[in-house]
Structure formats: C-alpha cells, structure tokens
C-alpha cells in the first residue's frame, strides 16, 4: 500500500497525503504553477523524495510541507499526517459568518405581490 523508498509523482503524492481532494486537482495545480518543489515550479510528473519542500498555493494561503515519507496510493488521514512535516504559516482567520446580502425594499426585481399591485393600479 505504501512505499517508503524511492520517489513518486508530485501530483500523486499531494493527492495521497490529502493536500488536495482529487488527483486531477493536484495535476491542475501543478500545471497552473501553484506547486513548487524546493523553490522550483514543477510539472505533475516531477519526482518528490523525502526531504523535499513542497509549497502548494491554495485560495487564501500557502501550504508549506516537508516530505518525510513517500506514498504512491491514497492513505488514511492518520497515516497521511505522518508523511509530511507541516511548516505552513497560520491560516488567515475566516469571517465569522458570510454576510447575507440585504436588499432595500423596492430595490431590484419586483416581487409577485408588487407586480399584482402594479397590475391592479393599471386596471388589468
């Protein structure tokens, strides 16, 4: 199930240790230039070895991990946590709740009630 020696593709490793949800998302991140290994932008097939520093840019922050163990297949969360050392800066705080947009009365598209009142005034 796991291989502790050798190397693995960077997109496969990122997916295997649960830094991305799917392997295709990991490969897309590599192609878009969001993945760096030891400071260099890499393609999805770039090999990753123990001791390499992997930087993965995600929306709003950057994950910085050092590879401690190479795995080629997706593993459980407990095993995945043992496969890297997380040196990421703390995640920026999220807003408590996303503010729901509030529309002033009479602004925007009329409601069904507004349309009926308009039709009644026009005599239809």
Image (cartoon, rainbow, N blue to C red):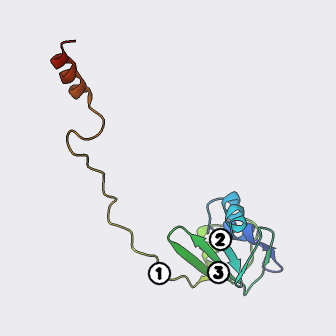
Q: Which label sits in the foreground, 1 or 2? A: 2
Q: Which label sits in the foreground, 2 or 3? A: 2
Q: Residue 34 carries which label?
A: 2
Residue 83 image offset from top left, x and y in percent = 67, 78
Q: Mark 1 points at which residue?
A: 90
Taking the spot 66% from the left edge, 59% from the top edge, the residue there is: 22
Q: Is mark 2 on a helix, strand or loop?
A: loop
Instruction: Report how far apart the C-alphas of labels 3 and 1 lie in the structure.
Output: 17 Å
Q: What element carries label 3?
A: strand
Write down the quadrant of residue 24 in the picture. bottom right
Above or below, comparing residue 97 to residue 8 in the picture: above
Q: Residue 39 carries which label?
A: none
Residue 21 image offset from top left, x and y in percent = 61, 60
Taking the spot 72% from the left edge, 65% from the top edge, the residue there is: 31
Residue 109 image offset from top left, x and y in percent = 30, 35
Taking the spot 74% from the left edge, 65% from the top edge, the residue there is: 73
Residue 52 image offset from top left, x and y in percent = 72, 85
Instruction: Report how far apart the C-alphas of labels 2 and 3 lie in the structure.
Output: 18 Å
Above or below, comparing residue 56 to residue 66 in the picture: above
Q: Residue 84 carries which label?
A: 3
Which numbered disc, 3 or 1, marks the residue that appears first in the sequence?
3
Taking the view exactly as shown, the residue that stands out farthest to the top is 124
Q: Which label sits in the foreground, 3 or 1? A: 1
């Amino acid at each position: 199930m796991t291989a502790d020696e050798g190397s693995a593709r960077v997109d496969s490793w990122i997916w295997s240790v649960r830094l991305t949800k799917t392997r295709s998302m990991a490969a897309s991140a590599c192609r878009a230039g969001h993945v760096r290994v030891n400071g260099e932008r890499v393609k999805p097939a770039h090999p990753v070895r123990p001791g390499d520093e992997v930087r993965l840019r995600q929306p709003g922050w950057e994950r910085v991990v050092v590879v401690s163990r190479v795995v080629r297949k997706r593993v459980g969360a407990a095993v995945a946590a043992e496969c890297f050392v997380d040196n990421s800066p703390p995640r920026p705080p999220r807003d408590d709740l996303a503010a729901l947009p509030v529309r002033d009365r009479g602004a925007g598209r009329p409601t069904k009630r507004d349309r009926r009142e308009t039709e009644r005034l026009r005599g239809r």
